[in-house]
Image (cartoon, rainbow, N blue to C red):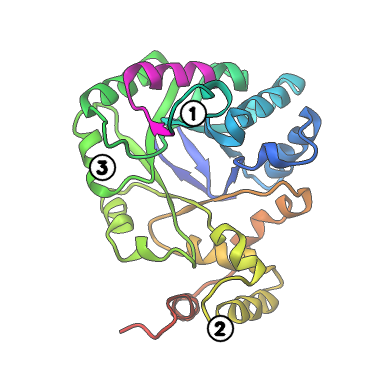
Amino acid sequence: MDRVTLTDTLSLSRIVYGMWRLSEDRDTSAGHVQAKVEACLEQGITSMDQADIYGGYEAEALLGAAFKAAPGLRDKCEIVTKCDIVAPAGRHADARVKHYDTSRAHVTQSVEDSLRLMAIDRIDLLLIHRPDPLMDHHETGRALDDLVASGKVGAVGVSNFRPWDWSLLQSAMQTPLVTNQIEISLNRLEPFTNGDLAFLQEKGVPPMAWSPLGGGSLMSGESDQKGLRPTLARVAKEQNVDIAAVAVAWLLAHPSKIMPVMGTNTLSRIATLGDALKVEMDRQAWFELYTHALGHEVP
């Protein structure tokens, strides 16, 4: 499995396993979660993507139970998690309204909660989950710097930030932001033209891509783009992989080193996540899919 270097001490597997659906599985036992992690590790997928809010603030604890049940498993993984979304659920059930909180107190407490729930002593990569319109960038920046200095967090980044949100936060920090996890797929093309990817590429910052299969619509055929699914199916047949592998390979072909975050609870699907790296995607094949996704020829 290819790897993407983020810092001198941190690299992630090119494909990341997303755990946002972990609590939705019928079997949430420690053994079953362990089996998912091990199915990833067998392919060289070592990076696990979490967030405090996933599963109504339950998903981190499910991963922690697996780590407790299988000593040594955590040492084979890089742990990514996120904070700042406060929703009326779980430990925030008393919140009057869903909101964002990038205050020092909240970010610091979120890290302590994540460490405890996942039964780990260090978060490899912490992301601010959503831009906060009330963010005091000096306060948030100092909190992130201090968490890295403490050793509780290895590196920091953001998620769903626009370039100006990134620049604002980074301006108040000593620690470099190392990634932005944004929605990118054949169903979400805007980052290719609205400056989001160009901004990161200019800075040499590899992006992470959430919902790389368009929330499953590319697999189910619900996508609106005429001709896209038949083209995905044709390429998949030619290269002896499934449609998902082609859609992910399309992202992998971009020079910004996109890291797709793949979420599934099915062990058989997890076992094929690495197939995307087998797909050959030349420039014309890339633009053929892009054209169908756009719904028209490029200008």
Q: Secondary structure at mark 3?
A: helix
Which residue is denoted by mark 2 in the rendering? Answer: 227
Most extreme residue toward the front, as rendered? Answer: 96
The quarter holding residue 58 reads top right
Q: Residue at x 72, y 20 (%)?
A: 71
Which numbered mark, 3 or 1, is in the foreground of this view? 3
Which residue is denoted by mark 3 in the rendering? Answer: 165
Most extreme residue toward the top, as rendered? Answer: 150
Amino acid type of the residue that numbered disc 1 sits on in the rendered structure: Asp
The reply to whether the C-beta atoms of the residues labelled 2 and 1 are less than 8 Å apart is no
Q: Which residues are magenta?
A: 98-114
User: Which badge, 2 or 1, comes first in the chain's sequence?
Assistant: 1
Give the number of the disc on residue 158. none
Which residue is denoted by mark 1 in the rendering? Answer: 124
Amino acid type of the residue that numbered disc 3 sits on in the rendered structure: Asp
Is 298 on the left-hand or right-hand side of 247? left
Residue 108 higher or lower than 21, as above or below: above
Q: Is residue 110 magenta?
A: yes
The residues bearing labels 3 and 2 have C-alpha atoms spaced at a distance of 36 Å
Q: Residue at x 54, y 61 (%)?
A: 214
Amino acid type of the residue that numbered disc 2 sits on in the rendered structure: Gly
The reply to whether the C-beta atoms of the residues labelled 3 and 1 are less than 8 Å apart is no
The residues bearing labels 3 and 1 have C-alpha atoms spaced at a distance of 22 Å
Compare residues 52 and 9 and report the one nearer the observer. Answer: 52
